[in-house]
Amino acid sequence: MITLLLALHPKSWRSRYGDEFRALLEARPMTSAVVLDVLGNAARQQVHSHPILLHIAMAMALSAGVEWVALTHQLTDNILWAPDSGPSAVLLAALLLPWLPLATDLVAATRQRRPRERLLP
């Protein structure tokens, strides 16, 4: 169980704190509160080391919420729809809007990794 809980943390975190954390977990009884605390810490560490995961999770949650509103107010019958009224157009924009920061982050990350071509010598 301890090995699994350690494996949930990012590799960089495990290499720095893994041995000490393993000793700490071995010294304590493995209660549900300890497991939940470790799971929460692992999630925080993963988000800290991969901030794009937080963007994806937030965009998914916001999109799901907007879709739920659209379905419960009978503005659409499915996830992908062509807006035929003002409210449904606003909901479609709200559904897509959370993904914009994620797309810009991905474009920025791609540009940082790829050297720019020189247009002029």
Image (cartoon, helix red, strand yellow):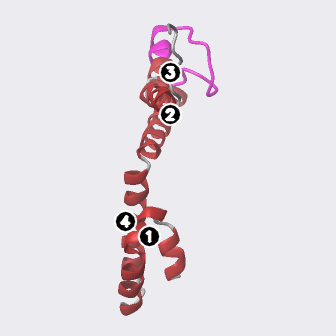
The residue type indicated by label 2 comes to Arg
* Of 44 and 16, the residue lying toward us: 16
Q: Residue at x 36, y 92 (%)?
A: 27
Which sits earlier in the primary sequence, circle 3 or circle 4? 4
- Position of residue 115 measured from the top left corner of the image (x, y, whole percent): 51, 26
Which residue is the site of mark 1?
14
Label 4 vs 1, first from the N-terminus: 1
For marks 3 and 4, give the one nearer the viewer: 3
| Marks 3 & 4, CB-CB < 8 Å contact | no
For marks 4 and 2, give the CA distance: 30 Å
Secondary structure under tag 2 reads helix
In the rendering, which numbered label is found on residue 116?
3
- Residue annotated with mark 4: 41
Count neighbours of disc 1 (C-alpha within 10 A) and say few if under 14, some if 14 to 19, many if 20 or more.
some
Tag in front: 4 or 2: 2
**Nearest the camera: 62 or 100?**
100
Secondary structure at badge 1 equals helix
Amino acid at dot 4: Asn
The residue range painted magenta reads 73-90
> What is the spatial separation of the Cα atoms under label 1 and label 2, in whole angstroms?
26 Å
> Is 76 part of what is drawn in magenta?
yes
Residue on which disc 2 sits: 113
Label 3 element class: loop
Coordinates of residue 90 in the picture (x, y in percent)? 44, 15
In the image, taking residue 78 as reference, residue 52 lies left or right, namely left
Residue drawn at the location 39% of the way across and 85% of the way down: 25
Picture layout, residue 50 above or below residue 78: below
Q: Which of 85 and 54 is in front in this view?
A: 54
